[in-house]
Image (cartoon, grey):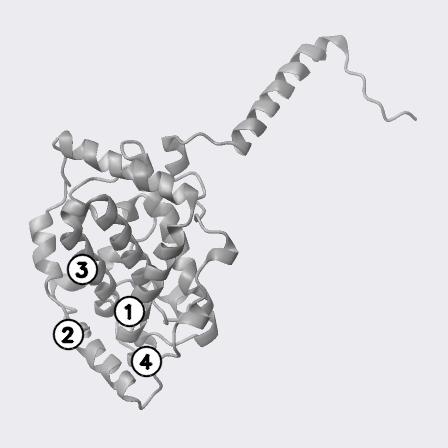
Amino acid sequence: MSSTFTPIPALRPLLGTALLAALAGCATTAAPPATPVEASVTTKAVGYLPADAVPASLALVPAPPAAGSAGFALDEQVSREARALRDSPRFAQAHRDAELGFPAGANQFSCAIDVEVDAVKTPALYRLLERSRIDASAATRTAKKHYQRPRPFMVNNEPTCSPEDEQDLRGNGSYPSGHTSIGWAWALILSEIAPDRADAILARGRNYGESRLVCNVHWQSDILEGRFMGAAAVARLHGNAAFNKDLMAARKEIVAARKAGLHSSRDCAAEEAVLKVRPASAL
């Protein structure tokens, strides 16, 4: 029996239309336009960096402080001070800072940059934050898997600011901190594209990581090495053409927002006051 398929005349126009649509879809996949659709929450985001360009955390960070060492004693002291903030507004802020999913995660630095980040209104900025988040997280992954350091709540058996995440966190090593790597990467990137707000942005990058101490899900040494890996990720990102294109476009979006008189819609004065509360021994 012949395997050749001959369409009947009535179906030929329909098949031709379908073929054209399929070819158009392939063309779109091969060269997607830079539109807000790329930043849509329905689109699976990917990082800018190929796997072989992601900083090698296992080679770059030392082993975490060992039990009984001076380093771990400081970790424990900072952890105690951070847990003492559980009944304060700082603990609630730590819960808000735990959210990395987009679109909510896009506005973690809204007050610091004094701009609302939106997939439609500021697509390049939204895309920049979402994609760099993936790279900064990947920069901590190898060391996390290798060391599998238990998180503070697994040691002290006290509550965290995000009980809904605890099951997943138990299987995800504490060292170095992925949230901190992301927050510090964002701080460095945003301070470049909004230099008029650089001090506020860098302060937000620091306290974003400290929220993980208050949340009882990271040790101080996790936070310090998380900042280091976030900076390493940003250094690699600057060699990526797509990142640099979005960086320039995001800068223009912020300038346009300033000219239009737009500001963050959050209660930034209240947020700033809360974020000034920090563990006394935190570095």
Which tag, 1 or 2, sits closer to the chain's start?
A: 2
3D distance between C-alphas at marks 2 and 3: 13 Å
Q: Quadrant of residue 248?
A: top left
CA distance separating discs 3 and 4: 22 Å
Q: Of all residues shown, which one is farthest toward the bottom? A: 68
Of callouts 3 and 4, the N-terminal one: 3
Provide the residue designation for mark 4.
155
The residue wearing badge 3 is 92
Q: Is residue 207 left or right of residue 101?
A: left
Residue under numbered circle 1: 223
Query: In percent of the image, x 71 and y 12: which residue is there?
Result: 12
Number of residues whose C-alpha sits closer than 10 Å to that of mark 2, classed few (under 14), some (14–19) or many (20 or more): few
* Disc 4 to disc 1, C-alpha distance: 17 Å
Q: Amino acid at mark 4?
A: Val
Label 2 – label 4 distance at C-alpha:
16 Å
Identified by mark 2, the residue type is Ala
| Element type where label 4 sits in the image | helix
